[in-house]
Image: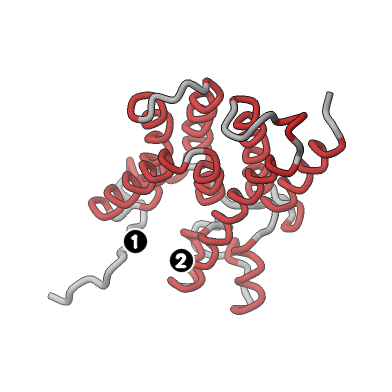
């Protein structure tokens, strides 16, 4: 039976995920809606391209914070519902809250249900549930980005590294983490369909962390 605390936490998680940081930041400080420019995505990468590094970094950290905070709401539901921290039951509640937050990011009630792709919010969720797996994802993301300059490909590879890291590196015994990892892979593939098409056609935009040297 779902308690009032569980239901309230799920609602708060969705509302946290629904905070359209890219949209609000763009409108408040730049007078534009980032969804009308670039890829049309309300996420950190498009904000980076449209508004610059400072805005992109700010949006990225806000979106990570959304996923992390929503997932940590499990600690306030009560032991009678979630069980002790780090137990399978507790992790299951964390995952449920995190997924709801990601859905909020994808379909934000505060921005006409037109959100981003959820990568940063997903990372915040992973960071809250299993920081070791999060570090693996970061490492994979950075390496792929430095080599290829493609944020989309880096995000896809990082997403796939989560279930692989959980199963083969960390050898987690919590089945829900593995199941969640598989769902992450599917979600990332779905939300990055257009990026994958552009990658295959060689038309995907690159991001340079450092200024290119003048020849």
Residue at mark 1: 207
Q: Which of the 4 quarters of the picture holds residue 140?
A: top left
Drawn side of residue 181 relative to residue 87, left or right = left
Q: Position of residue 208 (x, y in %)?
A: 30, 64
Q: Secondary structure at mark 1?
A: loop
- Please say if 155 is above or below 54: above
Q: Residue at x 27, y 69 (%)?
A: 210
Where is the N terminus found, in terms of image quarters?
top right
- Please say if 60 is above or below 180: below
- Please say if 18 is above or below 159: below
Where is the C terminus found, in terms of image quarters?
bottom left
- Please say if 191 is above or below 19: above
Question: Along the polypeptide, which appears first: circle 1 or circle 2?
Answer: 2
Q: Position of residue 101 (x, y in %)?
A: 66, 45
**Badge 2, how many Cα within 10 Å: few under 14, some, many 20+?**
many
Q: Residue at x 47, y 66 (%)?
A: 57
Q: Position of residue 96 (x, y in %)?
A: 66, 34
Dots 1 and 2: beta carbons under 8 Å? yes
Residue at mark 2: 48
Q: Residue at x 37, y 32 (%)?
A: 165
Drawn side of residue 116 relative to residue 150, left or right = right
Q: Residue at x 33, y 40 (%)?
A: 200
Q: Secondary structure at mark 2?
A: helix
Residues under labels 1 and 2: Cα distance?
A: 9 Å
């Amino acid at each position: 039976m779902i308690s009032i605390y569980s239901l309230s936490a799920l609602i708060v998680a969705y509302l946290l995920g629904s905070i359209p940081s890219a949209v609000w930041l763009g409108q408040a400080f730049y007078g534009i809606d980032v969804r009308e420019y670039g890829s049309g995505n309300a996420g950190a990468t498009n904000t980076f391209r449209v508004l610059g590094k400072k805005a992109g970094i700010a949006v990225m950290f806000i979106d990570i914070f959304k996923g992390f905070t929503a997932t940590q709401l499990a600690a306030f539901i009560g032991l009678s519902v979630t069980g002790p921290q780090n137990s399978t039951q507790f992790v299951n509640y964390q995952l449920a809250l995190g997924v709801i937050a990601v859905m909020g990011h994808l379909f934000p009630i505060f921005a006409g249900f037109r959100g981003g792709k959820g990568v940063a919010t997903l990372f915040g969720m992973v960071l809250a549930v299993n920081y070791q797996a999060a570090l693996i994802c970061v490492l994979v993301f950075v390496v792929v980005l430095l080599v290829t300059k493609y944020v989309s490909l880096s995000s896809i590879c990082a997403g796939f590294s989560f279930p692989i890291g959980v199963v083969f590196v960390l050898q987690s015994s919590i089945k829900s983490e593995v199941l969640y990892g598989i769902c992450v892979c599917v979600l990332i593939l779905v939300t990055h369909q257009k990026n994958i098409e552009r990658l295959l056609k060689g038309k995907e935009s690159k991001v340079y962390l450092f200024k290119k040297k003048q020849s």
